[in-house]
Amino acid sequence: MTITRQPIAAWSEVHDELRSRGLRGTPQRRLILDVLAATRGHVTGSEILERCRQRDPETTPSTVYRTLDVLEELGYLQHSHGADGREEYHVLPETEHAHLQCEQCGHSSEIQPAEVRELVQGIERSRGFTVHVGHLTIAGQCAACTEAAIDS
Amino acid sequence: MTITRQPIAAWSEVHDELRSRGLRGTPQRRLILDVLAATRGHVTGSEILERCRQRDPETTPSTVYRTLDVLEELGYLQHSHGADGREEYHVLPETEHAHLQCEQCGHSSEIQPAEVRELVQGIERSRGFTVHVGHLTIAGQCAACTEAAIDS
DNA sequence: ATTAATGCAAACGGTTTGCACTACT
DNA sequence: AGTAGTGCAAACCGTTTGCATTAAT
């Protein structure tokens, strides 16, 4: 017997959730939700736009960005900024995590909160500053690029 | 007797340094260097532009940004991205440090490397990832804004 | 004389806006 | 019918670029 987990995010329900809040379900939003359902981790706004356009070339930036705003207000997304300064959306309810972004190759990987807990707690204790772990991006050079640099 | 420390950055010498590298000293660059000399910590590119314009309204964006590029190449500046995604220049040779940026009020304060050393070393050990501490911005809510939120 | 740097003006890229129109409820 | 959402087109903002001109060496 195979144990199948629930899909991490119940994106199919979000559409209904919208309506129950007096907002509206539209084909455009359904498409955006579909794209998000097929997305893991983090994406930029323009990436979402592009993926929507692959499926429906008519997709408009304003609609996408406005919908992302709504979804963030409802708590389905969170955004932060990557090392290049672009808006980066985090698809929830994945565990909140920080990012490690290589400035050489641009690759971005996740760090679990446990790995940064000490830091976070230290800052919260000493500064009274509440850290948004999901908004934390640590830039630098990844192992692969470091090796490549040594080899050359 | 008063002990006066050397100015942290020898900005007055940078102009000469430029020339000794075959680059050129110009009044525009001198102005930018003056502005930088009067700057502590971090500034965005557009802030530098604005400050230059206060002194010389003729200042042109391209000149400023190009000069900042040059200065960064020479190692006098470093840039990262704030929580709002804008380019943030760090004036050196201040000690390299990370930033704490409040998403409510926008205020940004510095964290010394010592405070993040454990984190940094942990990541470097476990991931082989070289962290650029000077590029690290931790977002969240500062003590003042947290209090304000509680009071209301 | 050489060539780096400037200033202009235009383009960029991602994102946001105003507004008339459409379509969900 | 009422109002949320759409699409368009234009604006936005910080930043970047090409190119002819200027000026530092």
Image (cartoon, coloured by chain):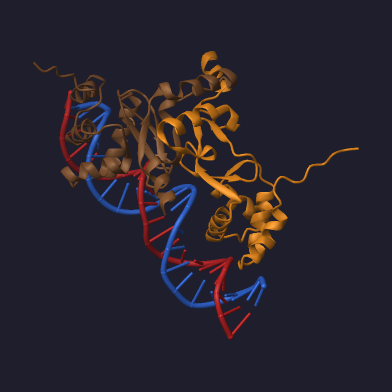
Chain colours: A orange, B brown, C blue, D red
Horizontal side, residue A129 vs residue A21: left or right: left
Q: Is residue B140 visible?
A: yes
Q: Is residue B91 above or below residue A59?
A: above
Q: Quadrant of the N terminus of chain B?
A: top left
Horizontal side, residue B20 vs residue A151: left or right: left
Residue at 15% over, 19% down: B4
Residue at 35% over, 26% down: B73
Front-most of residues A85 and B104:
B104
Residue at 22% over, 42% down: B51
Front-most of residues B21 and D2:
D2
Image spot of residue A113 (x, y percent): 58, 32
Determine which quarter of the picture holds residue D17: top left
Determine which quarter of the picture holds residue B77: top left
As drawn, the residue found furthest toward the top would be: A151
As drawn, the residue found furthest toward the front would be: B151
Front-most of residues A55 and B143:
B143
Image spot of residue B17 (x, y percent): 23, 21
Q: Is residue B22 above or below residue D18?
A: above
Tag count: 0
Q: Is residue B56 visible?
A: no
Q: Is residue A96 above or below residue A25?
A: above
As drawn, the residue found furthest toward the right would be: A1
Q: Is residue B126 above or below residue C14?
A: above
Image spot of residue B147 (x, y percent): 40, 45
Residue at 41% over, 51% down: B151
